[in-house]
Structures are given as structure tokens and as C-alpha cells.
Amino acid sequence: MKSQASSSTELEKSEGNSRSLDQALRPAQWEQYVGQGPIKENLRILLTAAKGRKHQPEHVLLYGPPGLGKTTLAHLIAREIGANLRTTSGPAIERVGDLASILTNLSPGDVLFVDEVHRLNKTIEEVLYPAMEAGMLDIVIGKGPSARTVQLELPAFTLVAATTRISMLSAPLRSRFSGGTFRLQYYTVDEIAEIIRRSAKILDIEVDTESLMEIARRSRATPRTANYLLKRARDFADVSGTSLDIKTVKKALALLEIDEAGLNQTDRDLLTVIVEKFGGGPVGLKTIAASLSEEDATVEEVNEPYLMQLGLLERTPRGRVVTKKGFEHIGELPPTEKQSKLL
Ligand SMILES: Nc1ncnc2c1ncn2[C@@H]1O[C@H](COP(=O)(O)OP(=O)(O)OP(=O)(O)O)[C@@H](O)[C@H]1O
Ligand SMILES: [Mg+2]
């Protein structure tokens, strides 16, 4: 009852609106999916060849930092082969029975999208192996000495799995993505600018090139962030009664504490903690996360990849190290220069 009673609150309405805004911005066709050229080309070949042979395309694994377009690609794959996309996620599949029910309810040709696949537990992974390899589901009926295994033949399906943490996937699971494992790359500023231009058109936002490029440079090379910043900058302009010009964009981004390089406060705190508390590193992930009061996973999946992309941070076998560029970014002198200044 509670959910019914609260279903029409303003907040939920606005959440619904922002979800549908996100839907509207998600590319529905390959031509609208900017960048990731090599992945698109590999997928085009995989899907076209399978279609030509009238075969089900093989399973595909997509990985990379959040917001780079993995879920969007899963939708495009299903669309390309004219299949239904069935969506679930690692944490949603708690029991073997959950997976069995998902698999047996697939229709022939479906694409099954499993998000956060690194969070599948081992027992479930083991049920998935024969399903991926041979289209068979082995289920154990009964318990103890009278238990027996029944094999069910599954409808042909393509598994598209996504993860932000490839290193957490077991080797046997990884090896079963026979269609390919693809790492999504960060986008160039021009690609992000193209995405913002398209989003601005869809959302009916007027934005000049200079302002658009400013948002693009500060979007951490990530489409989701680009769309988010565009929307926040538009809000800022609306509320201040100005147009979306460069001055307004800069003010909006300053209020969001996003700097010239696209770093947010946590990114900067991460560099500062390593520099001030640990002399620039090396220092372990857990120590950094604890100092920032953040989850290890967030630091590892969200903050570090972008800092490494910019060359501000390095991961070494002994821990994380802030680079010379990293020191400079937070206005500190790198250790060697500090020494020579002292001499
Ligand atoms: N290549 C692209 N071209 C245009 N827009 C894109 C592209 N990739 C992503 N987007 C936009 O960014 C949003 C986020 O992308 P998506 O949800 O696919 O990311 P994700 O990799 O699945 O993230 P997560 O790991 O958090 O699930 C999409 O809704 C879409 O609007
Ligand atoms: Mg996703």
C-alpha cells in the first residue's frame, strides 16, 4: 500500500521525468552512438556474420568505467538483430532458481543483458557455464542421496554482460564470452562535444560553441557526465534568468566544484590525501578510501580511472602514486623539485 500511496508524490514524478529524459538521450541507433569506433566495428562484423549464417550471435562482455555506454551498447546489439532485450543484474540473481527462471523464460533469439556481472556468486556462475556453452541448464532436483540432475535445453540466446570491474570476474567466466570482450575507452573532447550537441537539440537547449566546448572539456571524458553537466548548467541559467553563455557555464561548474580538468572535489581530495599524508605515495587503495570516507569500489571504479587517464595518478604494485602532473594539479611541488628548492 505504501508504494501506491507514495506513487504520485512530486519527487517520484520528477524522478520519473529524469528517467524519461535519460531515455530520450540514450542513442537508439548506431549512427547516434558517438565514438568507440573499434568496438562498433567488431560488433558490426560479429552481428552481421551471425545474421548471414542465421546463427545466434555469441556472448559478449563489455567493461569500462561507469557512464561510458555499456548499457546503451546492449540495447543497440538487441536492436541490430531484431531481438528482445531482457535485463537483469548480478546482485538481482540471488539464487540458482532466479537464474533458472530467467533462462527458461527467454524466447528464442533473445539478448540477455546482465549488468554488474562481477557480482554474480560462484554457484550461480557455475550454472551459467553450461548455459553459455551448450545452451543447457543443469538443475538439481531433491536433496541428499535422492538428488538428481535434470538437463533442460534452453532457447538460443546471446548473453551481453557488463562490468566496471573486470578484475573481479573469474577466469572461467571471462573465457566463455566467445563473441568478444570489449573495453570501452574514455571519449575525446570532440566526441563529448558531439554528444552534448545532440543532447542539447533533444532537450531544446540553446548553447553556443564556446560554452558547449567548456562543458565538454570538464565532463571527465564520459557521456553520462556530459549530459548531467548540460542539464545542471541549463538549470543554473534558468534560475538566474540568463542564457547559457560561457559566464553562466563557468559559474554553474564552479558551484558544482568541477575544475578546469573535470575533477570533482573527491578527485582532488584523493590527490591531496596521498600528497599530504603519504608524501605522494605509494599507498594502498584501502588506506586512501578510508581517509576519504569513501567505498573502495567507488574510488577504484570512478575516481582512479579518470585520474590515471589524465596522468595525475599511477597504480604501481606497491600502491597508488601521485605523478608530477598530479602534484602540480593541486598546486603542490613534486618531491624532486621541492628538494632542489631547499638546496
Ligand atoms: N557513445 C555514446 N554516444 C552518445 N551518448 C552516449 C554514448 N554512450 C553513452 N551515452 C549516454 O550516456 C548515458 C550513459 O550511458 P550508459 O548507461 O550506457 O553507460 P554505462 O556504461 O552502462 O554505465 P554504468 O556502468 O554506470 O551502468 C546514456 O544514457 C547515453 O545518453
Ligand atoms: Mg549501465
Image (cartoon, grey):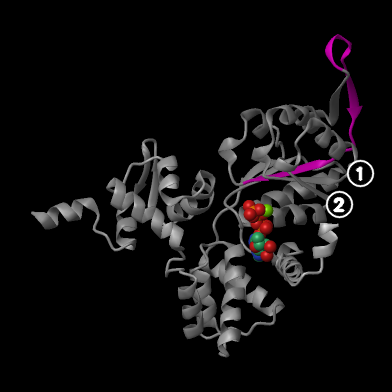
Using the image, tell me which numbered label, if any, was put on residue 84: 2
Contact check, label 1 and label 2, Cβ < 8 Å: yes
Residue 92 magenta:
no
Is residue 95 shown above or below 3? above
From the viewer's side, name the closer residue of 64 and 296: 296
Does residue 311 appear in this view?
A: no
In the rendered structure, the answer to whether residue 106 lies left or right of residue 323 reads right
From the viewer's side, name the closer residue of 35 and 317: 317
Q: What residue would you read off at disc 1? A: 107
Is residue 151 shown above or below 198? above
Q: Quadrant of the N terminus?
A: bottom right
Sequence order check: which comes first, mark 1 or mark 2? 2
From the viewer's side, name the closer residue of 254 and 198: 254
Determine whether the beta carbon of the residue marked 2 sits less than 8 angstroms from the nearest atom of ligand 2. no
Residue sitting at x 80%, y 55%: 80
In the rendered structure, the answer to whether residue 322 lies left or right of residue 258 reads left
Quarter of the image for residue 146 reads top right
Q: The residue under label 1 is which amino acid type?
A: Ser
Point out the quarter of the image occupied by ligand 1.
bottom right
In the rendered structure, the answer to whether residue 54 lies left or right of residue 62 reads right
Residue sitting at x 71%, y 50%: 43
Farthest residue, direction top: 145
Label 1 SS: loop
Is residue 171 shown above or below 166? above
Residue span colored magenta = 143-163
In the rendered structure, the answer to whether residue 342 lies left or right of residue 315 reads left
Residue 148 magenta:
yes
Does residue 85 appear in this view?
A: yes
